[in-house]
Image: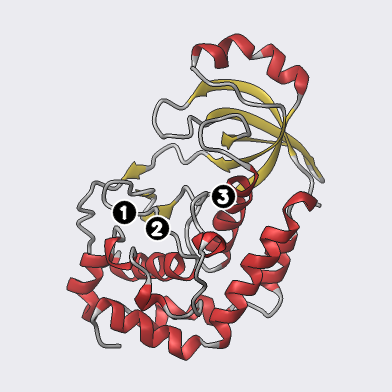
Amino acid sequence: MEETWEAVRFERVQPKGRTKPLLLECARDAEKGEERVRFIVKALGLPEIHEASLCQELLGCRLARLFGMAAPMAGLVNISTEFLAAIAVDVQQGGVSPSAGLAVGVELVPNLQVFPASPGLTLDEVTEAARIYLFDMISQNADRRPESPNCGRADGRIVPFDFENAFSFRLAILKSDPWRISGLTFANKHLFFHSLQEHGSEVKWGDVFAPFESVPAGAVANTCGTISAAWHAIGAAIHAHFEAVFAHWLEFKREVFATLGVSP
């Protein structure tokens, strides 16, 4: 398993968001000296957080970055018993009760401007938005909607975040072919769905698909396997799902165009 970050300084309980994550400064020893990063940290004990959602947050961020999106860096964070005791009053005042142990952090993007319900994409943004839509369809993430954008602008890029509810296929009672997204009830509720319908002819579809087609064989398996041992079964299921989509890539691409009602 990879080296974990250590929570070393408490800043605040994030005031927005249903999971009430913590803003923590975290450190780890690197080859050239200590690294420090400000992470938005989700931990067991926070609202709606469980082992699976931690794994999904970590892998959602990392797979999105693997496929060329500007998702924040994600890492495993250790919240020690001693650190938790030292910040007990602060977190209590924030109305939360996190547990000590392994958590997941995503790097704070300080200049992030979260999208409004109507994103109003520029022509320069539609191709990047289409790539995020594609990833959300592969990962079956129903949680990027106008009422819950989980996406913003920063430094000229579109930044997707909050992946803990991705990979919804894991909970499906009736399993369907992973590449057949036309049956997903949330496909037309996605934050970017209507913008992509409107501007589909301006999307550079070759650039949208290219990062998914150029990732080296084994990269998804490596990403899904570099996690806590307790999460290996979840990682294996996510890897198998992606492999099934890639094995039917042409059918998947046709499904994307049909769902959006656009021509390639």
Residues at discs 2 and 3 in contact (Cβ within 8 Å): no
Please name the residue that numbered disc 1 is placed on. 145
Q: Amino acid at mark 1?
A: Arg
* Within-10-Å neighbours for mark 2: few <14, some 14–19, many 20+: many
List x then y, in percent, for residue 79.
71, 29
Quarter of the rendering containing residue 78: top right
Q: Image point 48% across, 62% down: which residue?
A: 69
Amino acid type, label 2: Ala
- Which residue matches tag 2? 142
Structural distance between the alpha carbons of marks 3 and 1: 17 Å
User: Label 1's element?
Assistant: loop
Is residue 3 depicted above or below 234 in this figure? above
Q: Front-most of 35 and 117?
A: 117
Residue 44 in picture, x, y percent from top left: 63, 34
Q: Earlier in the sequence, mark 3 or mark 1?
A: 3
Nearest the eye: 37 or 62:
62
For disc 3, the marked residue is 57
Q: Is residue 89 above or below residue 220?
A: above
Q: Residue at x 68, y 61 (%)?
A: 235
Question: In which quadrant is the C terminus drawn?
Answer: bottom left
Circle 3: residue type: Glu
Q: Looking at this view, name the residue that lies furthest to the left.
A: 198
Question: What is the C-alpha distance between the residues marked 1 and 2?
Answer: 7 Å
Per the image, label 2 sits on a secondary structure element best described as loop
Q: Position of residue 80 (x, y in %)?
A: 76, 25
Total numbered circles: 3
